[in-house]
Each structure stands twice: as C-alpha cells, then as structure tokens.
C-alpha cells in the first residue's frame, strides 16, 4: 500500500503528490522546478541543496553540508528521501555557492581545555609596586626591578636588552614606581625583561602574540590574546614572493641571483607585516604590542624569510643550513611586532619537510595516537608522515605545483573565476562546473583538475593511461597542438574569450604529480612494513586538502582507496600547530621532539620510489587491486 | 784626609777638581756651567738631569728618573754625590723635557704570569674539519657544526646569531668543510658561535680583543692579542664630549636637553671608534676583527655611551639606572668592532663610583692584600677606596674639575703649552716653571696648580687660609678684580699675551677641591675606625696621579702626610683592570665581586663629611698634627 506525501516548494504555485521514498529531486521535477544538478544526481556537488522548512526526510548523504546546515534544514535534493509532507525552500544559486565557500574556509581553532596563561605561557606580565629609592637605599633602577621580579616570580637570572634598559628609568618615574614588566621566561630560573610599561596593568587586559604560517603560496596570520588564549583576528594573503617564482625551487634559484635573497626576504616580510596589521585591526591591537610570534613554514620559506642562503636545499645531498633555529627578536627578523618581541621559527625535519609539517603533526594529534595514521599536507609540494605515538616516518614528493594550477595550460590558483569542481555527463560527455565567486570562468584550479581528471576517467573520455578516446562523439574531445584535448568551457561562455581545455600534456603532468604522492605513501608504508590498508586514519592538512573531493581523488589514485570515514580534513594544521606552540612552551618543545623523532626518507635516493612512481603512472594505478572501489566504465 | 775627584763636563773646556762627597751641581758651578734648577736644588723637578758617561756616583734620589734612565747613566745633578772621576754629558734642555714626558705617559702593562688563552679566555677559536654531507648524512650545516664543536669543546648548548647563520653555508663551502668558528664561552656547557671563518686558522695567529677606559676627559684604548695576551697597540685621545661639558654634571644636564643624549653618545662613540682604528693600525689589525671589548668608566660615561638616561645620577637620591649591565654586542652599542663581538661594561658601585674604580681596585691588587690600603683615583672627580682583602669602603668627593684646570681663571688641561710644574724662589718670590711641549706657556694645568699652591704656601706668599701677604715686596703679588693675585707669567713672555696668574677665588676653588678629597679620606677612615696613619699604602691611579708631585700635594693637604715610600703611582688602573678582565673571565667576575663587596658611603648625606671638609679648608689643614712633615716658613 503506497503512501503519498505532499511536497510544497516555495517557488512553485502548488504542492505536488509523490510516493513515499521518492527523492526531493523527483518532487521538484514533478512540480516543474529546475534544480541545478551539475554532478548528475550523484550527491557530490552539493549544488542541489534545498532547505526543508517542515516535514520528515532521510538524508542518504550529507556530504557538502555542515552540521549547522543540517540543523538549519538543508538537504541535498538528489540524496534526500521524502518521508512525510514537506515544505521546501529552494535557495537562490548564489546563496548555496556562498554557503559552501564560507563553510570550507573557516578554520575552527579553539582554546585548548585548561589553558592557564600563568602556568603555560612563556610571556608573562607581572605588575609590581617597587619601594622608592632613598638616600638609605641607593639601589639602581635595574637592580631594584630585578629584586622585585625575583621575589614575585622566583626568576633569579634576569637579563634586559639595552633598548628596554634605556626606557626603564623614564617608565619607572612615569608610573611612580609602579611598573608592569613583560617577561620572556626561559626556564624556572631565568628570563628576560622584554618590555616595561608604566603603572599596574589589569590582569584581564589582553597580552598579544601571533601565529604565522608561511606557505609558498599563502601566508596566514593569527592574532592571539595570550591571557585568554583566544584567537582575536586572522588574516591571510598570497605570499608576495609568488611574483618571483611559483614553487620553492624557482624561488631558491631567484634568491641566488644578485640581490634576489634580499628581494624575497623583503617581499615576504611585506606580506607578513601587512597581515599583522590587518589581524591587529580586527583584534583591536597593534603589531608593536605583539611580544611573541611563532612561525611555521617549509624549510625554504624559513630560509628566505631569514635571508639564510637556501641553495643547498636544491642541490644534492639536499640539506638545509639549519632545521632548529635560535630564538630571534623581531628586530633581527624584520617583523614589525615589538622590536624586542621573540620570534620563534618552529623546527623542521629536512630540506623538504619543514616546520609546517612538524607543527601539523602536533596539531593533528597523530604523534599521540595509537592508530596508524597517514598525515598528508598537499600544498605546493606534497609532504606526508606515517606513524603513531610509537614511530614516525616522513617524506616529501616533488609533486610540483600541478595541483595548485601551475604546469597546466589553463591552470590557475583557487581564486575568483577559477572553476573548482567539474561534472561530466556520462551520456553526452557535456561538462558543467562551479566557479569560485560565481561569475564566468577564467581557468581551472587544483580541485577542478582532480575533479576533471576523475570525471574524464569515469566517463571513459580518457583511459587508464590518460589517453583520449577519439571514437567518442563529442565536439569537446578534439586534437590540438598538445595532442588530445577536452574543452571544459567555450570561448563565448567564459571570461578569457578562448576555450578552456585540458590537454594530454596537462594530464601527464597531473598524473606525475599524483603518482609522486601515491608513490610516497607506498615507500613510507614499505619502509616500516605497514601496508596502506592497515592505515587507520588519513589526516589531510593544508589549504589544498580543504577543497579536495575525496572520492574523485581516490578515483584518480591520488589518495589511497579506503572507507571515507577514515579520511579527515583538518584545515590549516601548520597554523594550528603554531597557535598551540604560541600558547604553551610544552607544545613548542613537543614540536621540536616530533621534528627530531621523525625519520626522514629521501625519496630521490630511493629506488623503491622510482618503482612505485612508475606503477602509479596509471589512473588510478597499475595494480587495480589497490583501488577496489573504483569501477571504471563497467570494466 | 780629603780625596779630590776630577769631573769633566762635555760642554766645558776643562775638567774641575772637587772633593769627594760633593754634588754634581757643585762641580758644574765650579766649571762655570749653567745647569737649570728651577726647584732650587730640591731634587723635585728633574730638570737638572745629566748623563754620567763614566765614573762612580751615588744617587740620593731617582725621583723623575725611570729605571732605563738610570741604566743609561742619567742622574739628577742636585741629588747625586760624586764618588770617583767623572765624565758627564749635559743634555740640551728640550731633550730632558722630552724624556720626562715620555717616561711619564708610558703605562707598563705586562701579560700576567701563566696566562693560558685556552683556559682563561672566554673567546675561543676552534679549527674544525667536518665530515662531508651526503645522501646518507643529510644533517643541516648548523647541526653538523654544533655536533663537531660539542665534540671538540664539550659545549653542548650552543647558539648562533642570525647574521652568522646567514654566512655559515658560504663559509663552510668556501673552506671545503674546514672551518674555524669563534666561540664566546658562557660557562662549561654553553656558548655562542659569534663568527665563522673559512679554513683552519693557525693557532698562533692573533685573536683580537680591546680594553677601553672611558674617562670624562680622556679615552684610552688598548688592543690585545688574546692568544698571547700581549697589548699590541694603544691610543688615547680627549673624549669628544668635552665640547659639551667639562664634568659629568654638565654632561648629564646636556644629555637631558633635546637630542643631547644622542649627541653625547655619538661623540664618545666617535672617539672610541677612532681610537680603535688607531690602535689597530699600530697592532696590524682592524676593528672588525675585535671579538671582545671590555669597557671601564665612571657611571655617567657608561650611561652616556649606552644612551641610558643619566639624570637620576645627578638628583637625590643619586642612583644609577644600572651598575651591572648585561653583556652587549658591538652592534647594539655602536662600537665598530665585529658586529657580533661582545661588549662588556664592567660593573660599577654607585652613581659616583663607577667601573673605573672597581676595575682599578682589581688591578691595584688592594682587594687581595692584607695591608690597609688607600686607593685614590683623582680624575675629573675624586674617588677613593679604603680597605684590604677583608673589607672595602668607597666614596666619591665632588671635588670638581679644579685639578684638571677647570674653575680656575688661567687653568687648562694638561696639553701642550700648559705649565705643569712651578717653583718659587723663597727669597725673591720669583717664579720659574716647566711647560708641556717646551714652548711658551698658555695656562696652568692641574699639577701646576698643586705645585703653585704649595710653593705659595711654603714661601709665605699666602697663609694657611689661602690669603695673600701683601706686605711682601714683589710685583708678582698684587690686587685684582678677584682679590689677591700671584702672577706666574708676564704677558710679554707667554703665548696668550696677557698675564697668567692665580687669584684668591682660584685658590678657594682649589682649597675646596683638596678639602673635599681629604675629607673623603677622613670619613672613609672614620667609618671603619681606621685612622689615616694606619694606612700602610696609598695607591694612586688615574692619569692625573701620574703627574702629581707627592711632596707638594702633601704640603697643601691634598694627600695625607706619610712617608713617601707608602705612596705608589699605578698609572691607569682602570685601563689595566679592563685589560685583566679582557684576558680572564675570572678577573671579570672578581671585578663584579669587588663592586658588590664595596660599601658605598654617600658623602652628601654624611654630616661627618661636612665637618671634615670644614676642617680641611686650610692649607694644609686646621689640625697641623695631621701634617707633621709640613713646616711652613719656620712656624
């Protein structure tokens, strides 16, 4: 006995009747409403999201929806079963786009439980009322302050930089012998007075620190109140060095020519200082009140920031000048925080596994878990770590920036106008897509390339070797000067007024990149005798990871084929790690331990890597048994 | 039975016969030769020095003669007894002048016995051959160097400044993995790599350091080879700050106005850097190869050099901003030595007892002796220390710069054209004098003022109160706009074409200065219950001390009346102390201990000082029993 339910869409004149168990898309079709389904009803694009105002539904999939979305009634129309009478709002397309984008870029950083700035923080603010000097007590200003601080904190070995000593007498007298020194505590006995402020400062007033992630492509800054531990402002921007090279190798080369090193230093400093300004505006602070800055970044970025010659990173045997750097001052580094403020560059592991990874490993929690974990950070390069609390091995694949849009004819960075997801109709081989910002497309960003490659493969446009099937009847498939091509967008419908297409050469580049990454997984697993199927969780960090469509990444063999629930996207793990180190010196020490603990495998010296790379130069892989879930065109 | 000896002067036609036991001056008179005796044959001026070419003499006094002078046959004619046939050279007057001046300014600094740079020196040079990096050993440059240094030296906690890290990779490769780091050793575990040089440097090659004494009037620099410990070049010059004030008080006032502090800093830096250049030229080095500099100076000079506001030094309760300063770098201080070179400001005791005194106490040896010792450093100010290895008390008298020629109408600094010693004929009251450089006089320097005051007193021109006896028949004694005057040099015989004279106002100023110093001795002795006659030795440091005529200083009551052999002139004890601290960190620590150990007595808060000062406002003193040897005009 079939039950019928009534479904009323806000933009339809009347309700329609559909049988129980039908999808919302079926009801919409019956009501004569166009719901955008670029992925063809596979539940992957999220573009058909609607808002269920009343009534019961069962969501088969909530991919592309956040918990808040579900709470607010959102449902993917093509994946949602009608289980009662419904009232449904069909949101305007731009609203969906906006929601999806916003949801993706939010990094959720929360203050760790039990954070206690007096116990955990290396920057301390100690308001002190001094006894007045007199003819009977002619102690010098500095000795007077030192004694009082020692009494208050137990720190008996105190130093002070000259610039602060210079301001000390003025501040003491301005505050009428009430003073608030800012201390940088080295250990239980020793510390440094990095600033002195007149008067007694209320304990609740924020005390500022900053966490910075210096990516090859993007720099992110987080302003933090060290008293509450709360992030108070974030800002991110492209690394201005991009204008001098897209990847680390081209920057290293640029640094070696003439004043290239100075130029690159000043470019990235410009970016960081501008971001500090912006984050401070949001947080109602100003950069020169920031007393501690924690930096994470790949080894090349750290070398370039500090103007340490990076050339040995690029040349065999590929070594850095330093992985563990001394604690510096803002003055030395050129950061425009408080000039005596501390600047800590977190320690990296090797030339191609930098502190962004050691910080990422900390914030991912993999160094504390018993689960065998694969941690992956695909940015301009691809770094990965395999292990658990017992052991950690790491390597970096020279994947190149293909997944950031470089080395691909119509590739571009994930900025406004970039297509970021593509769907190909299995029947017609026609393409539909989503554009960042919602306007006309200009090119293809990394996630679009993964998506496109997967769609081309799954719809039989290309074969496992990445070669086109020219027998197919579609004007989108054609031969060009770079061999086979697939046209995503025609000149007349896009921003650049020329066809946007993917060539066989592009496909080769993408396959090399994904093969390098997958070969990295293989060698890591091999080196410790852990097969990939034993990996209990895959943690994906980095900006790129946030936008990856896991299913498609598995289809092309970029990610290992395992149940979706084992994948977790962690957002910017590097910045989170820097934030954790900023709050608690113990975290900073743990990152240092993690860096020391990681066994680095140099892939360029490893024959296994070459073999694994060759095997991975198919879509998804030579060994299809590694990808049981990938079922290409009914093979 | 009287023996006769034959004496032949080179400038006389024939030899003369004189009885055994006669003075050389008697023989000269008999030979009709004019030998200059401005002091009237008292053996004090040294101007009658002759050179004994052959024959036996007995020298009653060798004051004004160095050991080398005596070795070369020099003898003071008025103090030398003929004990055999003699051949005598009478040197031209300018030659004597020159010799005396040269002899006085030479500071005899010798390397301490048993100096061992590897054991004593905090700056170490460690040539190291590193293992080459390879694909099997991808250790970073810095970690590789650290490990090698730790193996060589046992220093496990090593840091490196950013600027040196920046040059490390280039130096390593230039030297083909042979490298010579320069270390600054903090303690047995920790140190800092303050420079890296390519290749293996021969252990004998000099390693440079500098000792600097910053006086209110004069700055002295000594360049030292830290390997051998030998001074290799010295240079001294007036402190360019003089143009902005003669004494510390006027400089403190100047520093407080507008950019006065910046101006004073840059002036003294200019002087020090110029002197470093000059000393390095002599020592065949250059300033940027100096890795450690030890500075001594009074507290105001140190504040001004470091641009630390000095105003609290001048205002009750007279405190410094800091007596013990952190170790700085050349970069921070503005010294043009190696930019990461260490700059150590030795610790002072109080506002008016600076590190020149604590360094002076070390180099005088008084802190190690059981003898009750009075240490005195009269420069622009008068500081003194009383004590022994058991205890030390110190004070400073605001003597003012009268003894440096300031506050006296015709006073001037001890430079070319200054009269530096004066003799008055007891009968005629006529003056004779010695001029620095030998030309026509321009004015009176400090030692001339002491000399003049004593001669005026001893010849009855002035009385114990410093008032003139106008009953005397001499045109040199007259009344002027400042009361009584004594004319030292007439306008027509000097460089300035006006009479050079001393007024009663000048005499008052000088009496106040000497009274302040003597009152200092009294209070120091009183405060520890040690009468001045118990003092077993008086050690006189400072540039001024080198030129003092002790007898005359006692006559006016500036120095206590005790046997001459208890007085010792030590030359520049401050510079010597800095030199000792430069060689051996243990000396540096001992200076710090000395500074802490000294009990400072603030005279401006001490009623005893006012009483003692009043009593000392006579020549030599109200209580003549304190000056038994001073016999004024047969009183």
Image (spheres, coloured by chain):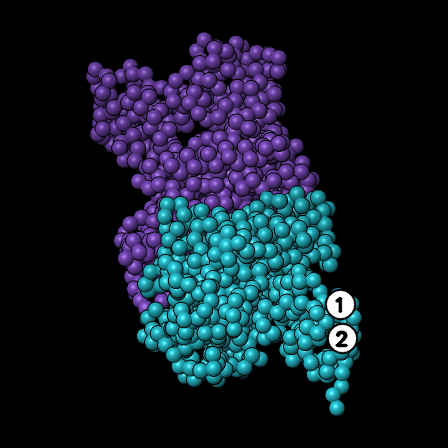
Chain colours: A cyan, B purple
- Give the image quarter of residue B277: top left
Q: CA distance from mark 1 to mark 2?
A: 9 Å
Mark 1, secondary structure of its residue: loop
Q: Residue furthest front?
A: A473
Residue B218 x, y percent position in the rendering: 47, 33
Residue at label 2? A16
Q: Answer whether labels 1 and 2 touch (C-beta < 8 Å).
A: yes
Residue at label 1? A12
Residue A285 x, y percent position in the rendering: 67, 51
- Give the image quarter of residue A157: bottom right
Residue at 59% of width from left, 44% of height from top?
Answer: A166
Residue A594's place in the image compared with A445, above or below, is below
- Give the image quarter of residue B409: top right
Q: Chain of mark 1?
A: A
Q: Chain of mark 2?
A: A
Residue B103 located left or right of residue A459: left
Residue at 48% of width from left, 65% of height from top?
Answer: A449
């Amino acid at each position: 006995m079939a039950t019928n339910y009534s479904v009323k869409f806000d933009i339809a004149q009347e309700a329609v009747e559909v049988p129980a168990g039908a999808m919302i898309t079926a009801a919409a079709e019956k009501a004569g409403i166009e719901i955008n389904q670029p992925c063809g009803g596979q539940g992957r694009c999220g573009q058909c999201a609607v808002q269920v105002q009343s009534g019961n539904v069962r969501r088969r999939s909530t991919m592309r929806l956040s918990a808040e979305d579900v709470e607010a009634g959102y449902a993917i129309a093509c994946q949602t079963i009608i289980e009662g009478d419904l009232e449904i709002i069909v949101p305007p397309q731009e609203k969906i786009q906006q929601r999806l984008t916003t949801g993706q870029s939010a990094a959720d950083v929360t203050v760790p439980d039990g954070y206690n700035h007096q116990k955990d923080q290396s920057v301390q603010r100690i308001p002190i009322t001094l006894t007045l000097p007199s003819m009977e007590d002619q102690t010098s200003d500095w000795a007077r302050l030192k004694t009082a601080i020692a009494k208050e904190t137990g720190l008996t070995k105190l130093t002070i930089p000259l610039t602060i000593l210079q301001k000390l007498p003025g501040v003491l007298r301005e505050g009428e012998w009430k003073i608030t020194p800012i201390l940088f505590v080295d250990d239980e006995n020793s510390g440094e007075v990095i600033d002195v402020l007149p008067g007694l400062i209320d304990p609740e007033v924020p005390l500022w620190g900053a966490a910075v992630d210096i990516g090859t492509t993007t720099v992110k800054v987080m302003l933090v109140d060290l008293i509450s531990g709360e992030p108070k402002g974030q800002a991110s921007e492209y690394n201005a060095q991009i204008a001098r090279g897209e990847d680390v190798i081209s920057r290293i080369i640029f640094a070696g020519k003439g004043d290239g090193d100075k130029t690159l230093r000043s470019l990235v400093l410009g970016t960081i200082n501008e971001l500090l300004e912006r984050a401070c505006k949001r947080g109602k602070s100003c950069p020169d009140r920031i007393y501690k800055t924690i930096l994470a970044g790949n080894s090349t970025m750290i070398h370039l920031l500090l103007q340490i010659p990076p050339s040995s990173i690029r040349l065999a045997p590929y070594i850095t000048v330093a992985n563990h750097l001394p604690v510096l001052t803002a003055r030395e580094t050129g950061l425009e925080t408080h000039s005596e403020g501390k600047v800590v560059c977190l320690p990296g592991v090797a030339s191609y596994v930098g502190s962004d990874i050691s910080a990422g490993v900390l914030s991912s929690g993999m160094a504390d878990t018993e689960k065998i974990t694969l941690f992956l950070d695909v940015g301009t390069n691809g770094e990965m770590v395999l292990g658990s609390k017992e052991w950690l091995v790491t390597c970096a694949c020279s994947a190149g920036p293909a997944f950031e849009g470089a080395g691909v004819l119509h590739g571009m960075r994930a900025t406004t106008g970039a297509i970021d997801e593509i769907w190909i109709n299995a029947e017609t081989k026609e393409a539909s897509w989503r554009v960042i910002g919602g306007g006309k497309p200009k090119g293809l960003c990394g996630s679009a390339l993964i998506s496109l490659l997967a769609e081309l493969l799954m719809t039989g446009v290309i074969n496992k070797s990445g070669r086109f099937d020219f027998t197919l009847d579609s004007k989108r498939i054609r031969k060009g000067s770079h061999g086979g091509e697939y046209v995503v967008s025609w000149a007349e419908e896009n921003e650049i007024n020329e066809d946007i297409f993917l060539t066989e050469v592009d496909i080769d580049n993408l396959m090399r990149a994904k093969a390098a990454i997958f070969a990295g997984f293989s060698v890591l697993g091999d080196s410790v005798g852990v097969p990939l199927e034993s990996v209990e969780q895959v943690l994906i960090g980095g900006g790129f990871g946030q936008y990856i469509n896991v299913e498609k990444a598995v289809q092309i063999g970029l990610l290992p084929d395992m149940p979706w629930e084992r994948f977790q996207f962690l957002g910017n793990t590097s910045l989170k790690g820097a934030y954790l180190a900023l709050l608690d010196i113990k975290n900073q020490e743990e990152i240092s331990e993690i860096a020391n603990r990681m066994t680095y495998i140099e892939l360029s010296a490893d024959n296994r890597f070459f073999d694994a790379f060759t095997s991975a130069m198919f879509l998804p892989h030579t060994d299809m048994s590694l990808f049981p879930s990938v079922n290409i065109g009914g093979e």
